[in-house]
Amino acid sequence: MSRPYFADGPALIQAARNATYVIQPPGYWLYAHLGGLFAVPTFGFSLINALASAAGCVIFYLVCLRLTGGLGARLATAAYAAIYFAWFAGCVQSSYAGELLLGPLLLLLMLRYVGSKSISALCGIALSYAAAAGIRPSDGVFLAPAFVYFVVKLVRERAHRIIVLCLAAAACLLWLIPQQIALAASSQNAGAQLWSVAAPEAPILHGFTKLAISNLARVLVPLAIAFWSLLPGIVLSREKQAIRTLLWIWIAPGLAFFALIYISDATYLCFLVPAILLLALTRQLRALSSAGLIVCFVWNLLFFCFARPARDTHNPAVAIYSVSGARYCAWALKHQWYRTLRTYTDVPVIGSEDRLH
């Protein structure tokens, strides 16, 4: 585990100590409150993230077993455990590690319900979605289309649809109401502050400026580094299953927002990791799938353990590698290394990122 230094970690620790439980919008009340249950919030957040990321691997393995054989499940789980920016997320005190547990848990319960029509699985789906949205409120938005698709397409009984929707809404209110009260007490306008961060980076508003292109690079470079070996299997697969459609819907909204509006850190992409790896588990191309997963595991393992940022440079490509790749590896954790593109090179490709950190 790292000492606190990355992203919102120090602010969350302070909020837990002060019992305010919110930082900048959207607040993160539920996650901050979990850390506040510990006498030492720094230890609490570290323990929560270590256990969440490790337990997420176990849950992900159970998901894989429902979709493929034992070998494919083991290979996919090994890759899941090694994805470099997800591994990093489990080692810092920010809220990203919760995605590594709650995402697979939500998928597992969905698959269980499809097979059994169990009310307990249905209730678990509602509570898992609400918990994921509470830990990372952006996940509640990005995963809402997949949640709705599941309810409309895979939940056949009307009574079951009412149960899962009402329970999810009620559970979300349990963290949303105190979060909004805490934000109001701190005099923070969530909508205005979030838009002030996102708007300068949005290519759909300002065209493909250098700022917009750098934002797109912060999305594509981590995905390419982590998942390049899986691309052939994903692209060539022609399997048509409801679960694969669900996975694409799981990915699309958040990825579109990050690419077109704003992303700061690769750890934002943690919620996509289980869906991408599950898409690579194709029965049609079993050998290609297995080879891609083996390479994915070995490559990410080596990259996380040995990648180091380059020295200061005026080469934008080298700087992008450092801040979108090596910044999320073991060396950076040990040395608490955090740099933005603007502090790395004099090429003016970053705007509000420096304001955030």
Image (tube, rainbow, N blue to C red):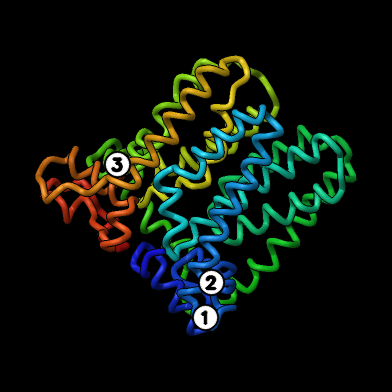
Q: Which residue is mark 2?
A: 32
Q: Earlier in the sequence, mark 3 or mark 1?
A: 1
Residue at figure coordinates x 28%, y 36% from the top left: 208
Q: Nearer the viewer, residue 138 or 100?
A: 100
Q: Are marks 3 and 2 in contact (CB under 8 Å)?
A: no
The type of residue carrying mark 3 is Ala
Residue neighbourhood size for the residue with mark 2, other residues' Cα within 10 Å, grouped as few (<14), some (14–19), many (≥20): many
The kind of residue on which mark 2 rests is Ala
Distance, label 1 to label 2, CA atoms, is 9 Å
Q: Percent position (x, y) of residue 170?
A: 75, 62
For the residues bearing labels 1 and 2, Cβ distance under 8 angstroms: yes
SS at badge 2:
helix
Mark 1 or mark 2, whichever is nearer to me: 2
- Residue ID for mark 1: 20
Identify the mark nearer the N-term, 3 or 2: 2
Q: Position of residue 340 (x, y in %)?
A: 24, 54
SS at mark 3 in the image: helix
Q: Which residue is mark 3?
A: 212
Query: Quadrant of the rendered structure where residue 35 is?
Result: bottom right
SS class of the residue under badge 1?
loop
